[in-house]
Image (cartoon, coloured by chain):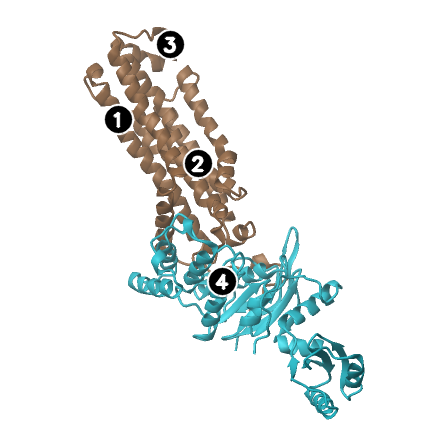
Amino acid sequence: MSAVSLDHPKTARRAREPMDRQAIVAVFKKDLTAIRRSKAVVLPMLLVPTLLMIVLPAVIGFAARSQESFSLDRFLGSLPGDLARPILELPAKEQLVVLVNGYLLAPLFLIVPLMVSAVLAANAFAGEKERRTLESLLHLPISARDLFYAKMLVAYVPALLVSWIGFVAFAIVANTVAWPVMHRVFVPTQLWGVMIFWVAPAVAALGLAVMVRVSARAKTSQEANQLGGAVILPLIFLAVGQATGLLLVDLPVALAIGAVIWLVALVLIGGGAKRFTREELSSRV
Amino acid sequence: MAVIETHDLTRSFSSGTAVDRLTFDVEAGEVVALLGPNGAGKTTTVRLLNGILDPHGGSARVLGLDPFTQGDELRARTGVLTEHAGLDDRLTARENLMFTAKIRGLEARTAERRLDELLGRFGMADRSDDLVQGFSTGQRKRLGLARALMHDPDVLFLDEPTSGLDPTATRDVVELIGTLASEHGRTIVLCTHFLGEAGRLAHRMAVLHRGTLHAFGKPTDLASELWPHLEAAIDLGASAPADLLTFMRQVSGVQSAEPTPEGATLRVADRDALARVVTMLVGRGVDVFAAVPRPPTLEDVYFAIEAGITGTSVTAPLVESRALEVPA
C-alpha cells in the first residue's frame, strides 16, 4: 500500500498526463449547448453588443444624414490636437460619424469581450457549484488541468466570436447607414484593427481571469458577477478618458494598453490555474 | 481479495476532523454500507476513496490504485452517484449520459447502445430526449445511477441514493441497487443514514460517527458481539400470565421473560434453551402456537453502537429508519 505521509501529504506528486482532447471538447460542447439554452445567460450577452455595435452606429449614421450640419467645433476644441485635427479637417457632416464611430466607440467596444467572457466564465466555474454539478464532474476521469482548459475555452471562444462578429456587423451598419454622408468605407480604421485583434482578446482574457479567481470563492454565478463586476471600471475610465480627451487612445497607446492587459490577465490566469485542483474545488463543494 | 483498503485514512477541514484514522476494507463483489448520521464523514470518505479530496494522513488503495496519485486512472474504473445526482438541468437525459460517455472515452456507437440499454432498464427510455429540468427526484436518481454505470465500473460509490425519494421511488431504487450488486460481482460502497436500504443491500456495515469508525463487520457478527444471547417470541394466543412467566424464567438457559400481547418475549442463552422452554410448556399443558427466534436487526445493532458512542439510551432515534431487517 503506497502511503501518504501523515506529515506532508501534499508533497506527493501526481504523474503529468498527456492532454485529453476528447474530454476537453466534450466539456466545451456540453457547456456551449447548456449556455445556448439558458436565456438568462444569452440575452444579456447579446443585448449589449447589439446596442453598442448595431443600434448606436445606426443612430449616429441616421443623425448625421438627417441634419444639415453639426457644430462639433466646441467639443473638438476641448480634445487634444492630435485627435481633433484630422476630424476638423473633414467636412462638417462627416465629423460626427468619424468622431463617434471611428474613435469614441473603440474603447467602449471593449465592454463586449469583457462582459461576454466574464458572464460565461462565471457560469462555467461558479455555475457548476450553483447547479450542484461540480462534484459529479470531479468524480469523472478528466484531469483538473484539462477541465480548466475546457472551462477557459467555453468562456473565451464565444467572447472572441461575439466581439468579432459584432465588429463585422458594426462595420456593415456604420458604413451602410453613413454612406450617403461619407460616400466611402471609413471603418475599420487602424485603431479599430488594433482594438479588435490585440486589445479585445486581451480584455476577454482579463474578464475570464478575474472570474476564475472570483468564482473560486463565489457560490453562485450571480455572486461571481457581482464580485467581479468591478473589472469593468478601467474600461469606463478608458472610454471617458477618450471622450474627454484626458487619455487619447491612439495606436501606440492601444498597443501598450493591450500589452498591459495581457500581462495582468496571464498572471491572474496562471494563479487561477495553480489553485484549480480537485482538492481545492471539492473542499468548497 | 480486497478491492478497497484504507489504513488510518484521515482528513480534516477548518471545521474539524471529518475522517479520523479510518481503517477498513471491502472485498470484491461485496456491498458495504457506511452508516452514520449527517456529518459522520461518509461523503468525505467517498471523496477520499475516489481521489477528489487529498488525505491529510494514512493511505488508501482502491482497485490496487492510490486515489491520491492515480486518481484519473482510478476514476475511469469507478462510478459515483452523488447525493444530488449532479445532472445538468439544461441538458436532456441522453445528453447528460453522452457527456459522461465522451469523458470516459467510450466510442459513440458503444455509448449509444449502452445508453439505450440503461435508460430502458431504469424505465427512462421515454424521457431520454426530455430536459432534466422537469424530472422528479426519483427520475434524477435513476438517471444518475444510469450515468454511473455507463462504463460498467468495477466499483460503485452510492452516496445517499434514496434521500429525498418517496417510498415507491425508494423501493425502485433499492431494487435497482440490489440487482446491480448481485450481477457482475460489482463492489458497492453505499453511504446512507437509512437503515432499511442498508439492511436489504449490505453484506457488511461500517458505523461512522464524527469521522471515527466505531464498528465494522457483518450485522450478525456485530450483533453476537453486542448480545451473546438470543431473543425469541413465544406465541401463546394471549399474553402470558405472571405465573407462566415465572415458570419460564426458571428454565435453564432463560435469562428473562417479558409479556407481549401474543404471549412472551424470551431472552435465552441459545436455541437449545428455547427448545427446553417449549417442551416444558407443552408438558404443562400450555398451547404453544409458535416459538420464533428473533435475530437482532440491523437497526438494533446500529442503535446499540450509537448508544455506546453517545451514551444515550439504546432506543434513541439517532437515525431515520425504514423497513428494518438483517440480510440473510
Circle nearer the viewer, 4 or 3: 4
Above or below for A219 versus B52: above
Looking at marks 2 and 1 on the same chain, the residue that comes earlier in the sequence is marked by: 1
A102 left or right of B323? left
Circle nearer the viewer, 2 or 4: 4
Image coordinates for residue A5, horizontal then vertical, percent? 61, 63
Residue B142 in which image quadrant = bottom left
In the rendered image, which residue does mark 1 sit on?
A171
Compute the Cα span from label 4 to label 1.
61 Å
In the rendered image, which residue does mark 4 sit on?
B168
- Amino acid type, residue under disc 3 in the picture: Phe
For the question of whether residue A196 can be seen, the reply is yes
* Other residues around mark 3 within 10 Å, as few (<14) / some (14–19) / many (≥20): few
* SS label for mark 4: helix
Q: Which mark is residue A97?
A: none
Residue A236 in which image quadrant = top left
Looking at marks 2 and 3 on the same chain, the residue that comes earlier in the sequence is marked by: 3
Please give the letter of the chain rendered in brown. A
* SS label for mark 1: helix
Q: Which mark is residue A75?
A: 3
For the question of whether residue A203 can be seen, the reply is no
